[in-house]
Image (spheres, grey):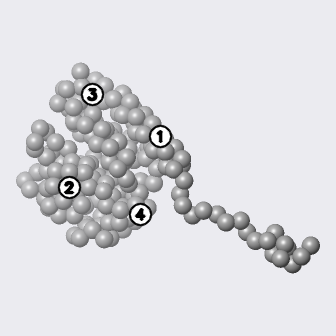
């Protein structure tokens, strides 16, 4: 055997560093099914119960204990131009957030879901838990009026994506519809 052939045999095979499409599709399907399961579980928890505090407490616990890699999940409710801490799961949190400040205040003011891949890069981020590295905030609406926000934090950078936004928005929509008596 020539030395040229021996060299060819000892080379490591080339591995493509391009991500394949299939795992992303599988992940999307799995994540979509997980959120569909959470919606069903939430509807079951809400059935027959109309106490807003009890329902938001169970909502926070459901999300916190069901989503992987989450270190905080909870509500802030708008009161007199401030977001005030509501039911949550995780470490103790900031009690009051000025409207428009931090990720929660920004989401409430913009009236839109905000995904922050790295909270340390967000101007004016309010660090309630230094372990949090990424965040998603979903506003709650009563018609056109913002009632507050649902906030989820993770110790992992880039933890949340558009599919999380879609799933969490659906969960919040189910909660608000239930509270307004629109869920049948």
Q: Cβ–Cβ below 8 Å for labels 3 and 4?
A: no
Identify the residue shown where x is 54% and y is 61%: 18
Mark pair 3, 4: CA separation: 36 Å
Mark pair 3, 1: CA separation: 31 Å
Circle nearer the N terminus (4, 2): 2
Observer-side mark, 2 or 3, equals: 2
Give the side of residue 59 with respect to residue 68, left or right. Answer: left
| Depth check, front residue: 9 or 76 | 9
Secondary structure category for the residue under label 3: loop
Residue 29's label in the rendered image is 1
Q: Is residue 102 above or below residue 138?
A: below
Give the side of residue 128 with respect to residue 41, left or right. Answer: left
Q: Which residue is mark 2?
A: 107
Q: Is residue 138 above or below residue 121?
A: above
Give the side of residue 86 with respect to residue 65, left or right. Answer: left
Mark pair 1, 2: CA separation: 28 Å
Q: Which residue is mark 4?
A: 157
Observer-side mark, 3 or 1, equals: 1
Mark 2 Cα shell of 10 Å, populated few (<14), some (14-19), many (≥20)? many
Q: Which residue is mark 3?
A: 49
Identify the residue shown where x is 35% and y is 62%: 117
Circle nearer the N terminus (2, 3): 3
Observer-side mark, 1 or 2, equals: 1
Is there any visible trace of residue 90 in the rendered image?
A: no
């Amino acid at each position: 055997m020539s030395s040229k052939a021996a060299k060819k045999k000892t080379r490591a095979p080339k591995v493509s560093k391009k991500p394949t499409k299939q795992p992303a599709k599988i992940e999307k399907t799995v994540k979509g099914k997980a959120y569909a399961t959470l919606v069903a579980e939430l509807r079951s928890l809400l059935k027959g119960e109309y106490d807003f505090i009890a329902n938001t407490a169970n909502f926070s616990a459901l999300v916190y204990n069901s989503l992987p890699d989450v270190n905080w999940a909870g509500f802030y409710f708008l009161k007199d131009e401030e977001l005030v801490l509501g039911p949550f799961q995780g470490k103790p949190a900031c009690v009051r957030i000025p409207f428009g400040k931090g990720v929660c205040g920004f989401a409430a003011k913009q009236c839109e879901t905000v995904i922050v891949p790295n909270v340390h890069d967000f101007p004016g981020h309010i660090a309630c838990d230094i372990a949090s590295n990424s965040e998603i905030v979903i506003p709650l609406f009563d018609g056109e009026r913002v009632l507050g926000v649902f906030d989820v934090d993770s110790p992992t950078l880039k933890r949340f994506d558009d599919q999380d936004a879609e799933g969490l928005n659906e969960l919040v929509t189910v909660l608000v519809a239930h509270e307004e008596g629109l869920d049948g």
